[in-house]
């Protein structure tokens, strides 16, 4: 059964500017500017002002949507909330090296753009992964992924999954 109109709103905090143009949302804050494309979702995005408080809000609507498209409203709001957290606070994501018998040696190379893992399960092969964001001076036993400039959580998830797939 289709619902005629489903909508949800979220407050925009002070110090954050949001621009909406053709389902592309730009969030600008003290730590930088992030954009996210929502053209694949059948949703309407609007910036509205609350009459009582005068604060700006982001309103997302779905007209004649099924259950799946209604659920995508909350997903889009969560993505925008993550963008807002990224431009205001930033993210820190930690990954820990754990070994049982063979001690793993890891080193950051190429100006903190790649990582090399040696002695993984006693192998002589050096495993290296580039295209990751590593911000750590002390590598062992933790790898610290922290990117305050970009501030998007999905970059950290991609970096850690690339490192996990290499091992």
Image (cartoon, rainbow, N blue to C red):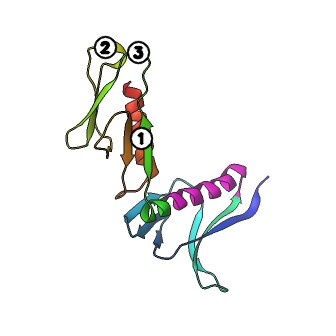
* Relative height, residue 85 to residue 120 (above, below): below
Q: Report if the CB atoms under discs 3 and 1 are less than 8 Å apart.
A: no
Tell me what residue is drawn at x 25 percent, y 43 percent.
112
Among the 4 quarters of the image, the one containing residue 9: bottom right
Looking at the image, residue 135 sits to the left or right of residue 70; the answer is: left
Which residue position is annotated with label 2? 123
Residue nearest the viewer, comparing 53 with 70? 53
Magenta stretch secondary structure, dominant: helix
Q: Earlier in the sequence, mark 1 or mark 2?
A: 2
Residue depth check, mark 2 versus mark 3: number of the one nearer the observer: 3
Residue found farthest to the right: 1
* Relative height, residue 27 to residue 14 (above, below): above
Q: CA distance from mark 1 to mark 2?
A: 25 Å
* Helix, strand or loop status at disc 3: loop
Residue depth check, mark 3 versus mark 1: number of the one nearer the observer: 3
Residue found farthest to the left: 110
* Helix, strand or loop status at disc 1: helix
Looking at the image, residue 26 sits to the left or right of residue 108; the answer is: right
Tell me what residue is drawn at x 39 percent, y 37 percent.
142
* Relative height, residue 93 to residue 148 (above, below): above
Q: CA distance from mark 2 to mark 3?
A: 12 Å
Q: Earlier in the sequence, mark 3 or mark 1?
A: 3
Q: In this picture, which residue range is highlighted in magenta?
A: 65-82
Which residue position is annotated with label 1? 158
* Helix, strand or loop status at disc 2: loop
| Magenta-drawn stretch contains 74 | yes
Which residue position is annotated with label 3? 101
Residue nearest the viewer, comparing 18 with 68? 18
């Amino acid at each position: 059964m289709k619902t005629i109109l489903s909508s949800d709103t979220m407050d925009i905090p002070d110090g954050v500017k949001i621009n909406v143009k053709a389902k592309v949302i730009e969030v600008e804050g003290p730590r930088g500017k992030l954009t996210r494309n929502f053209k694949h979702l059948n949703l309407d995005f609007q910036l509205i002002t609350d009459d009582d408080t005068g604060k700006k809000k982001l309103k997302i609507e779905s007209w004649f949507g099924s259950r799946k498209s209604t659920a995508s409203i909350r997903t889009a709001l969560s993505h925008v909330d993550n963008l807002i957290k990224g431009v205001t606070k930033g993210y820190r994501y930690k990954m820990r090296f754990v070994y049982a018998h063979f001690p793993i040696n890891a080193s950051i190379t190429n100006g903190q753009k790649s990582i090399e893992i040696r002695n993984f399960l006693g192998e002589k092969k050096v495993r290296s992964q580039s295209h990751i964001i590593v911000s750590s001076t002390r590598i062992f036993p933790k790898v610290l992924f922290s990117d305050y400039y970009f501030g998007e959580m999905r970059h950290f998830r991609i970096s850690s999954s690339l490192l996990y797939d290499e091992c």
